[in-house]
């Protein structure tokens, strides 16, 4: 039967050590069945018991604390997903953002109007122009319906636009960042800012004309970032 | 503690041999050794569903002033760090209770110093009681210490035999010594046993570690036991039968322990499926 | 049959089991009662002989030898063993305990030792309950209830007092009054009483006709509180003293018991009323038939205390219930007679009234269990009209004697050992958790030769606050480094390659051993003002124990103990 849990699974579900759950079974504090010398829990009973006692359950797999897993968040991948566009039109912040939102590859049913609204709201709060002619518009909180992996859309503008950036320089590159979680967002952001710190990369951006070349340059910098 | 071998020390030359075997076993299986030097005639072990009273005879209490010293000397000679168990709970002021969470426990065949009872063919009632209730395998020492260089698992296909096999596999892996399987088949073909091993998901480990399968289809069990290597640790699964039932109907374990002078690791019916090895 | 029971609803199952245990406990009590009578009759003719003063010694020696060598059971007079098992060991009791104490107690009491049959019968009942629970593979929680039920049934059956049995079990043994506890124990107690009534008839053991209690009497009973408290405090202290002195002076248990018995025999030659369990004496006291004389009852009270302490304190087998009642009745008589001397013109309610109150007062304060005292006295005397006075005396005596003796005679040894852990107290919760359950494993290991740079990287990657340092070759634990301690170096990037991890090892972080009890570990947390500690055994690092985890588990532990 699939709804039977072993000691180990039950302990993980309850977020406790196996020794504790085994002791509770011995003390008769938790509903358990004994079968051939081992104990089992009926998942349904265990859940209702936990609910009755207000013990929070830890659903699913344990959170990936594995550093190898985290490494997989790569800026270059995100850019590849989001795409690189050249000569994006618009002379005001609003126009540029509206144009960018149109270009982002997102699922059909995704509400792009609300995305634009969120981006503008964020822009009102404080400029996302982070200096050196680059802006990184993003919504304040992760929006619903975003895919699990990060998306970064890089748009090289046709005309430089004043984003009211901190260093007052007009913006020529807009990198729209869309992430499903805040953690993911922060990771992408730290990689992006690492890249932008390199003056060589910045001068490359100024006359970048090929998407592949951009991604390649990002990959090189990324490796540097990972190794510290 | 879960990663320890419990040894009840008796301060006699015979007890020294037993302790030496515990030291060797602990080193081989990479567990620590915890020695209890009894201060009273009895102690209790509170298992999950039963209290076992262990009555010790006077030999265990002999010469308490030197006991600790002797034990330490033997353990250090074996290259281990001595740890002693100081009982924390007392059911009565002269009745300590010992913890029951161990990886193994070492018992002589009988907790008694009478020479008639030390010989083969007799497992004392208290030792049986411990085997029946313990959640850990019991190492049954031999009168004289001898190093074992292989492990032989008696595999008859039953649930307890599978437990014994698991234990044997772990011991053989940590000790890095060859493993033999011993099966007294009767009418069943070898494939029957192979299927049991496969069903329990052990075939990979068996292939990796087992070097030989002593498989007997006919003949007398007693005579086959001669083929067990003389320097092998026998791993046997035991049922929870009472002493009376075992005396009346006999069991494989009974025969093994009367015929085989090797050290034995007895995996009782209440043993947890995975012994607490690293 | 086992499976059938396991599947039944928890509470019904407990009710059913409670009934079974009740029969067992009741039978044990009846059996003890009968054999006591038989044995007492057997010993009767010897009491007229010249060597009669040797009888208690003989009985005590026999009983100790029998217990140690034949039945191989060591332990005290029973109730503390049961309490220990209930609080620390999930109610597990040995099967041999269900009869060994009965036999030993028969020998002690019938030969004239001054003790009661209740302690032994409590452990018998408890052990029957425990073994029945083990047979049906019940869990600790249920087993504890059945132990309580067995004890309740035994007391209820021996006194024909069902409510007293319930009160005793809840107050002295389990230590908490909850609905589930009450159900099982009440059923067991009722069944136990019924068993005894079927076999022995329904009679009130010490029926006294007490009439005409005036308001003045109720007022006067407050004065009695002083006497009962003094009596019980003397009793408890003397008992402890005798046990300590005799235990230290005489190493052989049977000689010790024999010496005690001999002294009791000598006292008994002068005052024969102190011998045995003394039910006959109580009878006469309550019915007001006791021979007059103020000093003689005072002397008797003292002598009974001394002889009981000599019997039980030296290892004789028996309970203190019955002696308490006898002492109480003497104290009550003594007080009543003092009143008569002081106020000869006032018409008092009669000696029986004060004897009865004295019993309630002494029993309650020796056991530190007022409800037991109240119900027992009311039930065994069948006199409900004295209820108000009994309640007053019991409660006041407990309060007063609590000042001098905070623990009951049953609990004091356990309290000294640190094993008195009442349900739902902090110590009890901590004692149930063990370090292994709280261990956080899987922190990265550091090596002493590591540079600060590598360490900073590890800190960045891992959320832990404490990192163990191990010898790279042997894996031996060398010490621990706290993430907090490196904060001051974090921004000094030029130090990253000059500082080694071994320089950062925190000497203020003691390692704890997995054998340590959790309350000791908590003390270390408090003393060192740290929030996490490394757990080390055999020079190997096992994991980290932190206050946060303890709080989390502690709370869950509390939650699961709630009854829903």
Image: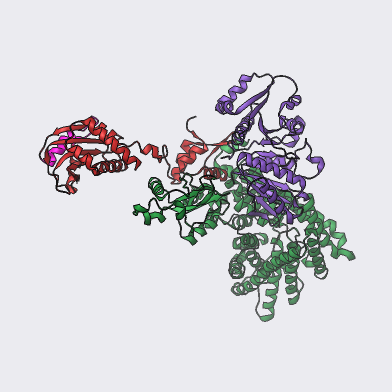
Chain colours: A red, B purple, C green
Residue at x-position 56% and y-position 42%: C12
Q: Is residue A85 visible?
A: yes
Residue C315 % position (x, y):
75, 60
Left or right of residue B87: residue C530 = left
Residue C504 % position (x, y):
45, 55
Q: Quadrant of residue C173?
A: bottom right
Q: Which residues are magenta?
A: A91-112
Left or right of residue C259: residue A129 = left
Residue C497 % position (x, y):
39, 50
Residue B109 % position (x, y):
74, 40
Q: Residue furthest right?
A: C50
Residue at x-position 65% and y-position 24%: B213
Residue A12 higher or lower than C343, as above or below = above
Residue at x-position 23% and y-position 31%: A213
Number of numbered discs visible in the structure rendering: 0
Residue A109 inside the magenta-drawn segment: yes
The residue nearer to you, when weighing A16 against C51, is A16
The residue nearer to you, when weighing A132 against A136, is A132
Residue A111 inside the magenta-drawn segment: yes
Q: Quadrant of residue C334?
A: bottom right
The residue nearer to you, when weighing B220 against C346, is B220
Residue C271 higher or lower than C102, as above or below = below
Residue A23 higher or lower than A150, as above or below = below
The C terminus of chain A - image quarter? top left
The residue nearer to you, when weighing B35 against B249, is B35
């Amino acid at each position: 039967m699939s709804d039977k849990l072993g000691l180990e699974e039950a302990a993980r579900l309850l977020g406790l050590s196996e020794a504790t759950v085994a002791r509770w079974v011995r003390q008769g504090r938790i509903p358990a069945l004994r079968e051939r010398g081992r104990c089992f829990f009926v998942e349904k009973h265990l859940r209702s018991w936990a609910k009755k006692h207000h013990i929070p359950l830890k659903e699913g797999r344990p959170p990936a604390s594995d550093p190898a897993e985290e490494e997989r968040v790569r800026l270059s991948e995100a850019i590849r997903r989001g795409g690189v566009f050249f000569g994006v039109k618009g002379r005001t912040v609003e126009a540029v953002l509206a144009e960018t939102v149109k270009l982002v590859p997102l699922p059909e049913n995704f509400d792009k109007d609300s995305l634009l609204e969120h981006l503008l709201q964020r822009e009102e709060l404080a400029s996302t122009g982070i200096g050196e002619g680059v802006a990184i518009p993003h919504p304040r909180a992760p929006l619903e319906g975003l895919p699990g992996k990060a998306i970064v859309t890089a748009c090289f503008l046709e005309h430089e636009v004043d984003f009211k950036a901190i260093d007052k320089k007009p913006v020529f590159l807009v990198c729209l960042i869309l992430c499903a979680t805040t953690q993911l967002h922060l990771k992408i952001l730290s990689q992006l800012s690492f890249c932008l710190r390199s003056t060589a990369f910045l001068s490359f951006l100024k006359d970048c004309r090929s998407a592949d070349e951009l991604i390649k340059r990002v990959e090189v910098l990324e490796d540097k970032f990972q190794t510290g | 503690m879960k990663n320890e071998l419990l040894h009840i020390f008796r301060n006699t030359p015979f007890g020294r041999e037993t302790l030496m075997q515990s030291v060797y076993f602990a080193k081989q299986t990479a567990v620590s050794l915890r020695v209890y030097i009894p201060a009273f005639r009895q102690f209790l072990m509170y298992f999950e569903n039963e209290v076992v009273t262990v009555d010790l005879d006077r030999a265990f209490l002999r010469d308490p002033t030197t006991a600790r010293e002797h034990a330490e000397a033997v353990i250090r000679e074996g290259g281990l760090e001595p740890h002693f168990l100081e009982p924390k709970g007392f059911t009565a002021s002269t009745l300590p209770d010992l913890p029951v969470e161990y990886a193994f426990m070492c018992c002589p065949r009988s907790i008694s110093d009478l020479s008639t009872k030390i010989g083969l063919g007799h497992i004392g009632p208290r030792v049986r009681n411990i085997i029946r209730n313990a959640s850990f395998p019991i190492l049954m020492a031999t009168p004289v210490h001898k190093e074992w260089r292989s492990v032989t698992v008696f595999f008859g296909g039953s649930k307890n035999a599978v437990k014994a096999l698991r234990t044997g596999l772990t011991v053989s892996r940590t000790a890095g010594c060859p493993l033999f399987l011993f099966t007294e088949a009767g009418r069943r073909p070898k494939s029957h046993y192979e299927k049991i091993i496969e069903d329990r998901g052990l075939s990979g480990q068996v292939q990796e570690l087992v070097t030989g399968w002593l498989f007997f289809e006919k003949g007398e069990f007693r005579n086959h036991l001669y083929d067990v290597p003389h320097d092998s640790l026998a791993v046997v699964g035991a049922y929870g039968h009472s002493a009376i039932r075992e005396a009346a109907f006999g069991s494989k374990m009974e025969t093994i322990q009367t015929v085989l002078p090797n050290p034995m690791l007895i995996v009782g019916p209440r043993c947890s499926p995975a012994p607490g090895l690293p | 049959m086992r499976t059938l029971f396991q599947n039944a609803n928890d509470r019904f199952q407990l009710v059913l089991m409670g009934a079974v245990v009740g029969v067992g406990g009741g039978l044990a009590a009846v059996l003890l009662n009968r054999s006591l009578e038989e044995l007492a009759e057997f010993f009767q003719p010897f009491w007229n002989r010249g060597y009669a003063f040797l009888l208690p010694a003989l009985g005590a020696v026999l009983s100790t030898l029998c217990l140690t060598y034949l039945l191989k059971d060591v332990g005290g007079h029973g109730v503390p063993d049961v309490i220990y098992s209930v609080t620390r060991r999930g109610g597990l009791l040995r099967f041999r305990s269900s009869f060994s104490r009965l036999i030993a107690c028969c020998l002690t009491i019938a030969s004239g030792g001054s003790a009661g049959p209740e302690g032994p019968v409590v452990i018998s009942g408890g052990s029957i309950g425990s073994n029945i629970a083990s047979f049906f593979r019940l869990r600790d929680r249920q087993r504890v209830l059945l132990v309580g039920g067995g004890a309740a049934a035994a007391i209820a059956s021996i006194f024909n007092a069902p409510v007293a049995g319930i009160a005793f079990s809840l107050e002295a043994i389990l230590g908490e009054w909850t609905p589930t506890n009450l159900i099982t124990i009440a059923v067991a107690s009722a069944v136990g009483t019924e068993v005894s009534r079927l076999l022995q008839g329904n009679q009130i053991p010490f029926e006294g006709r007490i009439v005409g209690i005036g308001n003045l009497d109720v007022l006067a009973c407050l004065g009695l509180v002083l006497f009962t408290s003094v009596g019980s405090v003397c009793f408890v202290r003397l008992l402890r003293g005798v046990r300590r002195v005799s235990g230290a002076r005489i190493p052989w248990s049977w000689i010790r018991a024999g010496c005690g018995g001999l002294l009791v025999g000598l006292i008994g030659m002068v005052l024969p009323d102190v011998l045995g369990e003394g039910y006959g004496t109580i009878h006469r006291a309550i019915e007001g038939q006791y021979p007059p004389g103020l000093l003689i009852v005072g002397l008797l009270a003292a002598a009974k205390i001394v002889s009981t302490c000599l019997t039980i304190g030296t290892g004789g087998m028996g309970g203190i219930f019955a002696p308490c009642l006898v002492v109480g009745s003497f104290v009550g008589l003594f007080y009543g007679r003092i009143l008569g001397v002081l106020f000869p013109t006032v018409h008092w309610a009669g000696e029986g009234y004060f004897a009865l109150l004295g019993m309630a007062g002494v029993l309650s304060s020796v056991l530190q269990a007022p409800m037991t005292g109240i119900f027992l006295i009311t039930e065994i005397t069948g006199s409900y009209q004295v209820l108000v006075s009994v309640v007053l005396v019991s409660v006041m005596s407990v309060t007063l004697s609590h000042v001098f003796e905070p623990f009951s005679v049953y609990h004091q040894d356990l309290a000294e050992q640190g094993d008195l852990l009442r349900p739902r107290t902090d110590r009890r919760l901590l004692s149930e958790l063990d370090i292994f359950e709280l261990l956080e494993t899987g922190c990265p290991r550091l090596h002493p030769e590591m540079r600060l740079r590598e360490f900073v990287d590890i800190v960045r990657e891992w959320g832990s606050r404490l990192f163990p340092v191990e010898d790279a070759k042997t894996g031996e634990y060398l010490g621990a480094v706290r993430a907090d301690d490196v904060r001051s170096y974090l921004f000094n990037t030029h130090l990253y390659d000059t500082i080694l991890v071994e320089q950062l090892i925190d000497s203020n972080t003691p390692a704890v051993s997995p054998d340590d009890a959790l309350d000791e570990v908590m003390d270390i947390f408090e003393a060192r003002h740290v929030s996490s500690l490394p757990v080390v055994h055999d020079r190997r690092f096992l994991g980290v124990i932190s206050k946060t985890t303890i709080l989390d588990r502690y709370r869950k532990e509390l939650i699961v103990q709630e009854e829903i």
